[in-house]
Amino acid sequence: MDKLQGGFDLDGVLALTQQSLLKELQTRGFYIGRKFEDVRTWEIEKAFPGEITVKNVMDVFHTPKFWERIEACPFLLAGAKNVSEKGVELHIVTARAPNEFIGNVETITRKWLWYNGIVYNKLAFVKASDKHKYCVEKKLDFFIEDRGDTAISISNTLSCCSYLIDTPYNKNTTTYFPLVVRKSRVYFQDFYRKHYGDKNCYTEAKYEARNTASHYE
Ligand SMILES: [Mg+2]
């Protein structure tokens, strides 16, 4: 049996980055009274036009320890540890860019992963628009993402199960591709149980991906 390989996005998936960003902006007097549920675009500066600028966001990113202090999503963190322990090869694939950091992006990211106890096989820095290519090249069986457009491009590869985390800012994502499944974080409890609950599920997950893809070949 082939070893299952999976990918996790970092910001908005394993890391609750948008929530931390909103909180930090509010301590600076921006977006007062706004709730995370009201943020309907992953680019937070576009959520409420005219209220903040890209520079305000970059200022937060450049605040010492901002990235280090981001909380992990407890559920997905547990899920990542769980699949890793079960022998799934885990890739963390992030679009974080050097200009968003005052220190070294890779060092800070690896430290955060270590601090949160995430065991992974590979950390890759890949632009959002290239993540689908990465999934094909590395033969990933599934990918967990929070950006709607990225999740769709991954589902379009027809070789990688694309799971879209349910967040306020991807509610408008629409697609007819069946591999994009937008579910709540709670859904992943079922996801992990189903795919990784016992050893037979590895085969089941692969079969499911291929079977669905075959309708479009
Ligand atoms: Mg993300």
Image (spheres, helix red, strand yellow):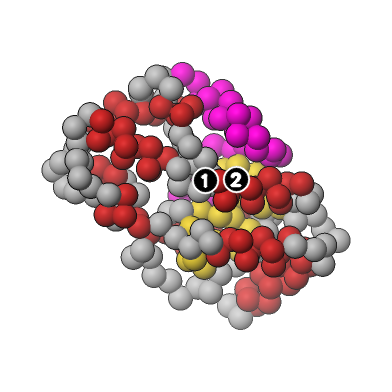
Numbered tag placed on residue 77 in the rendering: 2
Classify residue 211 by image quadrant. Answer: bottom right
Tally of numbered discs: 2
On the image, the x and y values in percent for residue 144 come to 56, 55
**Disc 1 to disc 2, C-alpha distance:** 6 Å
Q: Is residue 79 left or right of residue 38?
A: right
- Hey, what amino acid is under mark 1? Cys
Q: Residue furthest right?
A: 1
- Hey, what amino acid is under mark 2? Leu
Residue at coordinates 51% horizontally, 58% vertically from top-left? 185
Q: Kindly tell me whether mark 2's CB lies below 8 Å from ligand 1.
A: no
**Circles 1 and 2: CB atoms closer than 8 Å:** yes
Between 105 and 30, which is closer to the camera in this rendering?
Answer: 30
On the image, the x and y values in percent for residue 216 come to 58, 78
Q: Is residue 125 above or below residue 49?
A: above
On the image, the x and y values in percent for residue 135 come to 61, 53
Residue at coordinates 48% horizontally, 63% vertically from top-left? 184
Crowd band around label 1 with a 10 angstrom C-alpha radius: few (<14), some (14–19), many (20+): some
Q: Which residue is mark 1?
A: 73
Q: Is residue 18 left or right of residue 13?
A: left
Q: Is residue 134 visible?
A: no
Q: Is residue 41 left or right of residue 124?
A: left
Q: Kindly tell me whether mark 1's CB lies below 8 Å from ligand 1.
A: no
Mark 2: secondary structure: helix
Crowd band around label 2 with a 10 angstrom C-alpha radius: few (<14), some (14–19), many (20+): some
On the image, the x and y values in percent for residue 110 come to 59, 28
Residue 105 part of the magenta-drawn span? yes
Mark 1: secondary structure: loop
Q: Is residue 169 visible?
A: yes
The segment highlighted magenta reads: 103-132
Q: Is residue 206 left or right of residue 103?
A: right
Numbered tag placed on residue 217 in the rendering: none
